[in-house]
Amino acid sequence: MRHGQSISNVKEICDCWPEKIYSPLTKIGRTAVKESAEKLKEKDIDMIFASPLLRTKQTSEIVGRALKVKPKFTLELKEVDCGIYNGQPFEKLQEFLGEKGLRRFKLLPKNGETYIEIKKRMVDFLKKVDSKYKGKNILFVSHELPLLLLDCAVKKIPNKDFFLKREKISTAELRKLN
């Protein structure tokens, strides 16, 4: 699940770890998360793992209350580390990254991480959780790009096709990994 809409989404500001701006869920975001939580009630969720950023904490806590499951927070599900662009307008990071393409998988913002590093972090966490909690129905609450990279890894979509075959994930959207 992607977190609900937050202030940084509305203002189009890069907001990664460590958080430099206060970016709680918006009213729209809280409402959408509550709607998603209702859909999750029929899924028998055993555990919730979430990024520790405010917007994902709030999302997972809303869902956790609805499902009566206490979320566990882990940096492995954190947002992309935007490095020097953390707290800056999203367009500045976009200018640095340039056109969508393979170079984004290796391009490193100063003090940040590459798409390859994010993908590895997410896949490693999935493997760790999968081996430790076999047979459990687990919800991850994270951020758009890390979730997209994980989704593509699970679907075995090669990096070269990421920008062609990925399916955008909206705020508060649920997506099953197969």
Image (cartoon, rainbow, N blue to C red):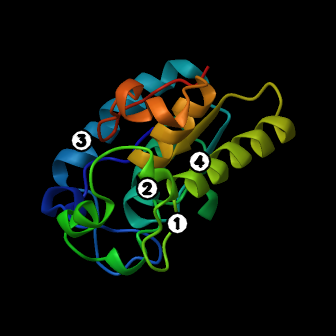
Q: Position of residue 76 (x, y in %)?
A: 63, 58
Could you tell which of marks 2 and 3 lies nearer the N-terminus? 3
Which residue matches tag 3? 31
Give the CA distance from mark 1 to mark 2. 20 Å
| Residue kind at label 2, given as amino acid type | Thr
- Left or right, 96 with respect to 75, comes to left
Question: Which of the two residues, 62 or 88, is positioned nearer the viewer here?
Answer: 88
- Dots 2 and 3: beta carbons under 8 Å? no
Q: Which residue is mark 2?
A: 56
176 sits to left or right of 167 = right
Q: Position of residue 149 (x, y in %)?
A: 51, 40
- Frontmost residue, 170 versus 149: 149
Mark 4 neighbour class, 10 Å CA radius: few under 14, some 14 to 19, many 20 or more: many
Q: Residue at x 78, y 35 (%)?
A: 130
Q: Which residue is mark 4?
A: 119
Q: CA distance from mark 1 to mark 4?
A: 10 Å
Tell me if label 2 and label 4 are in contact, CB under 8 Å. no
Q: CA distance from mark 2 to mark 3?
A: 14 Å
Q: Nearer the viewer, mark 3 or mark 1?
A: 1
Which residue is labeled 1 in the image?
113
Crowding near the residue tagged with mark 1, few <14, some 14–19, many ≥20 C-alpha atoms within 10 Å: some
Tell me which residue sits at (75%, 29%) in the image.
Answer: 136
Does dot 4 land on a helix, a strand or a loop? helix
